[in-house]
Image: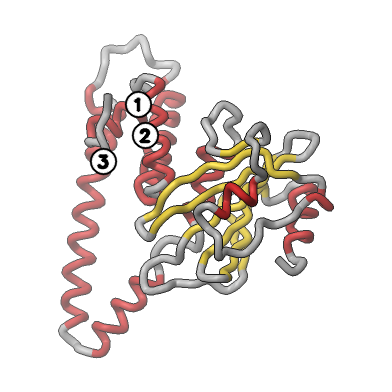
Amino acid sequence: MITLPPSERDVHAYVDGQLNDADQQTMETYLAANPELAKQVLAWQLDVQNLRAGLSGDLHRPMNPELDPAYVRQRLRRNRTRHFATAAVLLIAVSIGGLSGWQAREMTLASGAPPMADAVQAYRMFAVNDNMASDWNTGKPNNVQVWLDKNFAQANRLPDLESAGFKPVSGRLTSTEQGAAAMVVYKDEQGRTLSFYIRPPAERNHLLPRGTRRDGELQADYWSGAGYNYAMVGPADDPAAQAARQALKQPI
């Protein structure tokens, strides 16, 4: 059984699909609460898929240790470390300039993770997986708003998307460095999926203006209110999801 935070060996075992079901569930829960690591793990998984696809016709050849996915990941990490070290030296040099150094620091902070990146990652990991364990579902005695109020009593009400054909079907609690977070999954009669994500603001009370961004095939619509950050995530180009976004623009 793995322990948290997971070791580098445990993370590689997860990427290579070598964990048992219980450890895999533990790792997925941990990654949902740690979006930066989850993003890196997803990149490693894509590396593995691309390597296997590229080598599918050459598997009869003798094994080359330099093509082992774990070795490739280690080499990439070493390269990134060298790049980060170079960037750090440059930042220190700029900081000596006083005010210009402070401005560079502010620009670095501003260029961090995009808004509600953890909401998008949670959708990819949990919203489209019908077998994923949930903390609330339609079989529970209380409705989803009652369940949500246990941890977010002062937050804005859950969006009503029934006019677009979407109803809440499950909910899952997770965590961030700033406190508890939660995701509510909506589905329509055709099984199309959206997710609503709520979390405390990031450090320095980073509340968000209402906005939209695209991440691959997904679109995240985000906003803030009552001391929390919110996001609705779903397929970017799906007409049903677009109709739900129009419903979302109504007063919440």
Q: Residues within 10 Å of mark 1 (few under 14, many from 20)?
A: some
Residue 155, compared with residue 12, is above or below; it is below
Lower sequence index among marks 2 and 3: 3
Q: Amino acid at mark 2?
A: Met
Q: Give me the C-alpha separation between circle 2 and circle 3.
A: 9 Å
Q: Residues within 10 Å of mark 3 (few under 14, many from 20)?
A: few
Disc 3: which residue: 5
Q: Which mark is residue 23?
A: 1
- Report helix, strand or loop for mark 3: loop
Q: Amino acid at mark 1?
A: Asp
Q: Mark 1–mark 2 contact, CB under 8 Å?
A: yes
Q: Amino acid at mark 3?
A: Pro
Q: Is residue 29 left or right of residue 80?
A: right
Q: Give me the C-alpha separation between circle 1 and circle 2.
A: 6 Å
Q: Is residue 136 left or right of residue 38?
A: right
Q: Residues within 10 Å of mark 2 (few under 14, many from 20)?
A: many
Dividing the picture into quarters, in which one does residue 211 lie? bottom right
Q: Residue furthest top?
A: 60
Disc 2: which residue: 27
